[in-house]
Image (tube, helix red, strand yellow):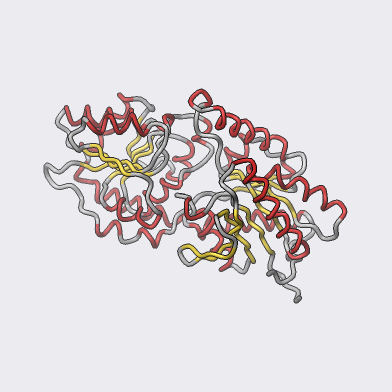
Amino acid sequence: MTQSAQPHLFWIHTVSLPDQLDSATWLDTTQALRNMGWQVTLISSGSREGTASLRGIDYTVVSKPNVYFLGQLLYHLKLSRRILSNWRNIDIILFHQMSSFWMIPLRLLSLFLWKRPLFVLDTRTLPMEHTENLGLKDRLRVAFFMFVTNYSRLWVDGQLAITEPMAEAIKIPPRQYWGVWPSGVDAERFQDVQTERRWPQAGDPVRYVYVGALSTERNLLGFCRALEQANAEGIPCEMLIVGGGTQEADLKALAATSEGRIQMLPPVPHDQIPELLMQAHVGVLPFPDEQRFNVSSPIKLFEYLASGLVIYSTKLICITSVTSDHPDIFWAKASEDAAFLAAIREVHQQRDRLPEIGAEMQSMADKWTWDEAAKKLARGLQKGLAQFGRAEGNSMTST
């Protein structure tokens, strides 16, 4: 083995990356960290052990049976063996709540082993659905998530969060707070969308789009009702919805009566998102002003910006922290039908300016790339290494 000054990050993800709509969070940030000189072992679950590549980014697959508790147990046992076999080579183990419980035995074992890795919890979201809308299994999952979030502060070395409000919401102790790293976007992947988009001409409908989870709490049904009311008032507009979730059936029922104005597609691979956004003019974010939405900036916002979509949103901290109080964003003053309709009317009044506004939105995305997110993540991790006297990284060349 040869000594290396570059830190080695062992990054655990418990879901299959090809199945994740937001896989760029891990893949693109991993590549950006590697470009900065970090050694990153990115872990994904899957059906077969080995190495894999997605969009040209390499990662390691650890097999996980499709049985929830047993699958998690076997998955983390295999992970533990990998970690122990590279124990002296790893500087930081980064994981989220679903891995936290399973990391405790390794943390206890580290009390008796030389040169241990640092254990770091990364929190990027809170449970999104009201528990009364969930079945027993999902309620237990939410309870487990919150329990793990609370007890992890008793033993982890450090914590990271997606935003400052998230760090405040989960009460990260100051001694464990290593910083925040936000969501982002691969702006180059969306750069041609703006130039190829056909903006509405006289009489053409303004086409709205939403890409993401279709849970009841996200208010898509209310927005669609407002869109139908706008059409009844003589305001031509359409809606494209891409995703799945608990409100999907209600949305499909409304779409079936909309004479084609509301169209729905199931979740699609990430590489198809730019083409779908090219077909639209306005990106919709109709979320309620609740803590779980304010603590985590949605990736779809950055993709809307990068593709040059006009932004239509309720005025939440998670949105304004990215866009500031931009005068050309169309704000719904509340997450209710009347406010949605009022904002649709404003879009209609300014329809001739939509291409200009879209260009402004696209320029905003340059500050929110995955490269920029990776820089913030690297600063947080280096802060933690320095706190434990490992500012230069202590790892050997990794396997």
* Residue that extends furthest to the right in the rendered view of this protein: 112
Q: Which residue is located at x 56 percent, y 44 percent?
A: 124
- Which x, y percent locates residue 8? 68, 64
Picture coordinates of residue 315 (x, y %)?
41, 34
Left or right: residue 159 versus residue 132 is right
Position of 290 compared to 355: left or right?
right
In this picture, residue 185 sits left or right of residue 358:
right
> Which residue occupies 29% across, 48% down?
357
Q: From the image, which quarter does the N terminus lie in?
A: bottom right
Please name whichever residue, 293 or 59, is drawn nearer the observer in this view of the structure. 59
Relative to 389, residue 342 above or below: above
Kindly give the residue lying farthest to the left in the view shown: 202
Q: Quadrant of residue 217?
A: top left
Please indicate whether residue 1 sits to the left or right of residue 329 in the image. right
Q: Nearer the viewer, residue 366 or 192?
A: 192
Residue 106: image location, x then y, percent? 77, 50
Q: Quadrant of residue 39?
A: bottom right
The residue positioned farthest toward the bottom in the image shown: 2
Q: Residue 16 or 314: which is nearer the viewer? A: 16
Quadrant in which the C terminus appears: bottom right
Q: Looking at the picture, how far across and down is residue 308, in whole percent?
A: 32, 52
Q: How many marks?
A: 0
- From the viewer's perspective, is residue 258 above or below residue 45? above
In the rendered image, the vertical position of residue 75 relative to residue 115, given as above or below: above
Residue beneath the point at 55% across and 32% down: 138
